[in-house]
Image (cartoon, grey):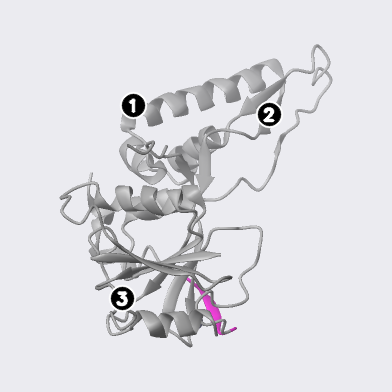
Amino acid sequence: MSPRIKVLRKVSNPPVIKGFKPYGQESGKKNSEIVNLLYEEYEAIRLSDYDMLNHHQASVMMGVSRPTFTRIYASALHKTAKAFVEGKQISIEGGKVYFDSEWYHCEKCVCYFNNPEKEKPVENCPLCNSERVDKFDYENTVESNTDTKHK
Amino acid sequence: MKVAITSTGNSLESTIDPRFGQCAYFFIYDIQNKAMEFIPNPNIDADQGAGPATVQFFASRNINKIISGEFGMKIKSLLDCLRIQMIVLKNPEKKIKEIIDMLNH
Ligand SMILES: [Zn+2]
């Protein structure tokens, strides 16, 4: 029996910043403790309060159960509130997450492929090596007839 | 660099199998040393869980890329976690040997 693959929480994109610093007279004076917001907690706030999804939709987006989502979200709000009230820095890092990969299309061999290594830009088709590759919105086209809507 | 292709049969004349979890054979190709291997899909009769079991199998074989006709949402997230590249080829006529030629450009 092979070990089970652990499913991580899906985060669409890393946040654009690494964190927040408070300002004002008392900021960071009393102690320099930093509140660490995990990536999945950042994502929970983004989905719920920026994209305005309900908890069910947000849990599906992150690939977790609804109670798990609610727990992540509650922790995210508690940490953010603590930073606000106590004037602490927030750093956004860590957590059990993976980032959803981007998809591309090759005009020459007409294949679709994702880029599992976000750091490296895609220049060639992994199949035929052609340079005629474009970004492609996989989820909203090719996938429309498969199991996107269950749960 | 090891590539897995879902195949309808166990010869180079076989065509790509569009089904990921329920494909007949796995074809594994090592681009560096040109080693080839056909493996009957052990999970073919599983009603459920064939897809994740196939992902596990490929992960245990250190596969870097997988070529198939489709990847469901669940499979995509598993492969994203494992950083295995997915290549979707929507052409059921393509033979395994033709795909090898493409990979060798
Ligand atoms: Zn191509």
Disc 2 or 1, which lies upstream in sequence?
1
Please give left or right for residue A139 compared with residue A91 in the image. left
| Amino acid tagged 1 | Pro
Find residue B16 and name its label. 3
SS for tag 3? loop
User: Is A26 left or right of A107, judged from the image as shown?
Assistant: right
On the same chain, marks 2 and 1? The answer is yes
User: Which residue bears the numbered disc 1?
Assistant: A67
Residue furthest to the top: A30
The magenta-colored residue range is A131-136
Please identify the quarter of the rendering in which residue A60 is found. Answer: top left
Three-letter residue code for mark 2: Ile
Work out which quarter of the rendered image holds the C terminus of chain A and state it: top left
Residue B46: x and y, percent? 17, 50
Residue on which the image places disc 2: A90
Q: Is residue A56 left or right of residue B103?
A: left
Q: Is residue A120 magenta?
A: no
